[in-house]
Every structure is written in C-alpha cells, then in structure tokens.
Image (cartoon, rainbow, N blue to C red):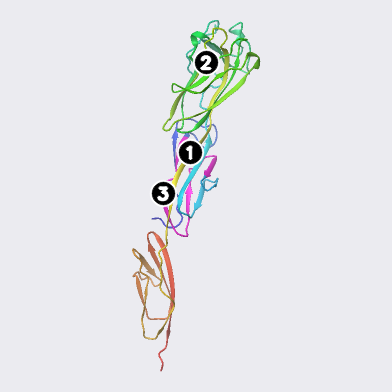
Amino acid sequence: MPQGPVNIRPHILMISGLIGSGALVAQPCSIDLGPDTTICQGQSGTLTAPPGFPDYLWSTGAITPAISVNLPGTYWGEASYPSPQLFPNSNFNAGNTGFSTDFTATTDLSSDGRYWVGTNPNTYHGQFFGTGTGNFMIVNSGWPSALWNVYCQTVPVCPGQTYTLSYRTRTLSNATPARLQWWVDGAPVGPEVTLPAFNAGWQTITQNWTSGAGVTTANLCLRVMSGEGVGNDFGLDDITMQGTIRLRDFVDVNVTPLPVVDLGPNATMCQGQNLVLDAAVPGGTYLWQDGSTLPTLAVSQAGNYAVTVSANGCQGEAQATVAFNPLPV
C-alpha cells in the first residue's frame, strides 16, 4: 500500500468529433480517475482529473482539476465541456450537401415532396414567400410526403449525455403550417411541433434528447408528420445539435491506521543494569537510531532512543529516554 501523498493517474476515452476550441481535439466520452487507493492515517492523497477540460467539479464541492483528501470514503470527480456542433453545414451555407432526406432536390418546387437550398423561395415557387439571412432549406411538403424524413444526420454521441436539438423555421405560404417531429434511430422523440403561422416569420424550436447507455452513434431525423393537401410548406435553417458533456468517475479512498509503537515510559536504571526496549508490532519492520533492525534493543547506556516501525505500508515512531544512576559507594 502506498505511503504519503498519492497521485491517481487519469485517463480519458475519446470518440471521433472535433471540438471547436481549446486544447481538446476529440470528443471525450469518459474519464478515469484511476484505481482505488490507500493512504496512511494523518497523511493526504491527491485525486487528479484529466487535464484540458474547461470545468471541473468534485463531490467535495471543489472546482479544481485536482483535490487533496485525507478521509476515507468514495469520491467522484466530474469534467465537463461544451460539445462541438455535430451537424455539418447546419446553416446550408455550403448548399445542398452534408445531410440526407426523403425529398427530391430540384429547383422546380411546384409539386409536393420536393426541396431546394436557396435564399428566396419565391424563385422556385410563385406562392412561396419569406427570405432568410442566407441559404436555407425550402420544402414543399403535402399529403404524399407525410411521415417523410426531411433532414437526417448520423453523428457520434457520448453515452448518457443530454444534447439540445435546435432549428429555425418559418412557414412559406399562407396556408396550414406543417408539423415536424424529431426521430432518433427510428423512434419518435418529443412532441410533434406545429410550425409558426406564415405571418409569424422565423422562429427557433428547441428540445433536449438524452443518449442511452452504451450509445455512441445516433441517426437523427426531422420528420414531416402532417399530410394536408394544402400548406405544409416551410423553410429550415440553423439545424444544430450540441450540449454540455458531463463525465464522472468514482474512486474509493481507504485510510490505514499508523502502527502503534510503545516503548514504555522513560526509565532510570542502576549502573550495570540492562533495559530492553520492545517495539514489536504484527508484520512490522524496524529501524532504530543506531541502524539496528530488530524488534528489540538492549540499552546499557544513558541516552535518547528512537525507533521507526513500518507496517501495512505506513510508519509509526516512538522515543524513550533512559538514565543510569551510579551505584552507591
């Protein structure tokens, strides 16, 4: 068992995915504070989280990368960071790329089930109105395209983490707004959302999604749930997925008592007598001030005597003063 301060070696597990800034170059999905450890009573150990994260939190309330502990118990440490924005070309500035869809890409949006990426929907359909600040996805939906996926991405995720799904949208014609819903890995997530009315302009829709245990990739789709024959025409922009990733690990700290060493009280002997100092403890090793290493030391001269005893990885010490009186003449 270790003696004195203990530094616990940290580890992190990364998955593919760039982080926008800072020292991290991948998306960490776990941390490891190292094995359980043992310290000696009255001493301290150091628990250290992996470096490079912007925020830390410990079960003690500390917010530093490392903490000093001297009490037994189970401690947890948490490292957190803002995840990268996981959807490429989320603002469609790169045009018609970086996503999949059940809709047909064409500049002729006169029929249902078609879309295009542009800046002015009226260019592609005479009854569509409402521009954005740049490119956006212009969608003509309707009853043939009900339950179609309008926008899909397969992305790396960290297990058990909560992500915020967000998109900006507006209705492009003065008719029935569409209803959209997020689906993840083929299952609906959250409520159906009725898009804002035509005169409401652009609005931002957000909801949270938490990945399951062991999930490292996810297929996320915005699905058109409505199928009315008139309406269901909308624009999409700034479709994003990101969140704060919180990674936690636990470590047990055990405290070993120091060996109890007792040489007895200070003693006064008569000249010519011997005194045996006994430092024996179960499993101990010994070092006396004169370099001897036996459990006992025979004393025949006055002086101060000291011993260091090691047992179970910890050390205890004891001292005794011995005096000798001359014999009466």
Q: Is 87 in the magenta? A: no
Under mark 1, the amino acid is: Leu
Please tell me whether residue 155 is drawn above or below residue 175 in the rendered image: below
Mark found first going from the N terminus, 1 or 3: 3
* Residue sitting at the far right: 199
Q: Residues within 10 Å of mark 1 (few under 14, many from 20)?
A: many
Q: Secondary structure at mark 1?
A: strand
Mark found first going from the N terminus, 2 or 3: 3
Nearest-to-viewer mark from 2 and 1: 1
* Residue at 41% over, 66% down: 260
Please tell me whether residue 91 is drawn above or below residue 255 in the rendered image: above
Q: Secondary structure at mark 2?
A: loop
The residue beneath circle 3 is 36
The residue beneath circle 1 is 247
Q: Position of residue 229 (x, y in %)?
A: 54, 7
The residue beneath circle 2 is 96
Q: Secondary structure at mark 3?
A: loop
Under mark 2, the amino acid is: Asn
Disc 2 to disc 3, how far (Cα)? 52 Å
Under mark 3, the amino acid is: Asp
Mark found first going from the N terminus, 2 or 1: 2
Disc 1 to disc 3, how far (Cα)? 18 Å
Viewer-proximal residue among 91 and 127: 127
Judge from the rendering whether residue 203 lies leftward or rightward of residue 153; answer left or right. Answer: right
Q: Is residue 125 visible?
A: yes
